[in-house]
C-alpha cells in the first residue's frame, strides 16, 4: 500500500516507521513520499537517505490557505497515495484533503486523548501542560483524522508514567520512546494489512483483512 508521511520537524516518528519497515514489521507498507511545510525539516533529509521522494510544500507559497490544501490533495492523488500518516505535521488539514481521503489519514498525538488535545496542543506544549496539571499518567494516541482537531476515531493508545522531577523535554522523550514510536508503526501495519475499519465513529480491529483499495468494485 502506497503511504505518504507528512512531517514538520526532525522526523523521529518517520524514522520509527522506516526502522520498522527495515526490520520487516511493515510488509504491506510502501513509503513513497514525505511532505513537509518547512524547508529545513530534517525529515526531508531522512527521506532522501532512504530513497524516498522528499517534497517541500509551504503554506506561504499560496495566497489562500484553501489553495494550499487543494495543492496538497492533488500532490497526494497524483502519487496514488492510499494512506496518509501525520507524524508531527503542524498544519491542520483542510477539507479538500480530508474529503479526498476519508478514514485514510492517521495522526499520532502525544497524550491520552481526550486529555491535553485540541487547538494549540502540540509538541512540547502538551508535556508542559501535563506537568502543570500534575497528572501521574500520560501517553500517546494514534487516531484517524476527521474535520476536527484530535477528534477522530481512536486506533491505539499507550500509557506512560509521569516521573518525579520530569522536565517537559524528558517527558517528551519518554513518551516518544515508550509510546509514539511503538504505536504508529503498529497502526500503519494494521491499516495496510486491512485490519482497521471505522464504523459509527469508532475504530474496529478485524480478525481478517478488509478491502483496502478504497473501492467497492471488488468481485
Image: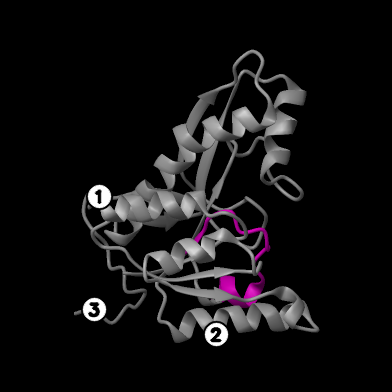
Number of residues whose C-alpha sits closer than 10 Å to that of mark 3, classed few (under 14), some (14–19) or many (20 or more): few
- Alpha-carbon distance for marks 2 and 1? 32 Å
Q: Tag 1 or tag 3, which sits nearer the N-term? A: 1
Percent position of residue 8, x then y: 62, 60
- Alpha-carbon distance for marks 2 and 3? 25 Å
- As drawn, the label of residue 151 is none
Helix, strand or loop status at disc 3: loop
Q: Which residue is mark 2?
A: 74
Q: Tag 1 or tag 2, which sits nearer the N-term? A: 1
Q: Quadrant of residue 133?
A: top right
At 59% from the left and 16% from the top, the residue drawn is 163
Is 148 located above or below residue 120 in the figure?
Answer: below
Magenta region: 84-99
Q: Quadrant of residue 29?
A: bottom left
Is 168 located above or below residue 54 in the figure?
Answer: above
- Alpha-carbon distance for marks 3 and 1? 32 Å
Q: Quadrant of the C terminus?
A: bottom left
At 31% from the left and 61% from the top, the residue drawn is 192
Q: 89 left or right of 102?
A: right
Q: Which residue is mark 1?
A: 23
Number of residues whose C-alpha sits closer than 10 Å to that of mark 2, classed few (under 14), some (14–19) or many (20 or more): some
Amino acid at each position: 500500500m502506497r503511504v505518504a508521511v507528512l512531517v514538520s520537524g526532525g522526523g523521529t516518528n518517520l524514522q520509527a516507521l522506516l526502522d520498522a519497515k527495515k526490520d520487516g514489521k511493515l510488509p504491506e507498507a510502501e513509503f513513497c513520499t514525505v511532505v513537509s511545510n518547512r524547508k529545513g525539516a530534517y525529515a526531508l533529509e531522512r527521506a532522501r537517505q532512504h530513497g524516498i521522494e522528499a517534497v517541500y510544500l509551504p503554506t506561504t507559497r499560496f495566497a489562500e490557505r484553501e489553495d494550499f490544501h487543494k495543492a496538497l490533495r492533488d500532490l497526494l492523488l497524483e502519487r496514488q497515495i492510499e494512506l496518509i500518516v501525520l507524524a508531527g505535521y503542524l498544519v491542520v488539514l483542510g477539507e479538500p484533503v480530508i474529503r479526498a481521503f476519508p478514514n485514510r489519514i492517521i495522526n499520532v498525538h502525544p497524550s491520552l486523548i481526550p486529555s491535553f488535545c485540541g487547538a494549540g496542543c502540540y509538541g512540547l506544549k502538551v508535556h508542559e501542560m501535563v506537568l502543570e496539571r500534575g497528572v501521574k499518567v500520560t501517553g500517546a494516541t494514534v487516531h484517524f483524522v476527521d474535520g476536527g482537531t484530535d477528534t477522530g476515531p481512536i486506533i491505539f493508545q499507550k500509557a506512560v508514567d509521569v516521573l518525579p522531577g520530569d522536565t517537559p523535554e524528558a517527558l517528551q522523550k519518554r513518551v516518544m520512546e515508550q509510546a509514539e514510536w511503538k504505536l504508529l508503526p503498529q497502526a500503519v501495519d494494521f491499516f495496510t494489512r486491512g485490519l482497521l475499519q471505522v464504523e459509527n465513529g469508532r475504530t474496529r480491529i478485524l480478525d481478517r483483512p478488509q478491502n483496502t483499495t478504497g473501492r467497492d468494485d471488488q468481485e
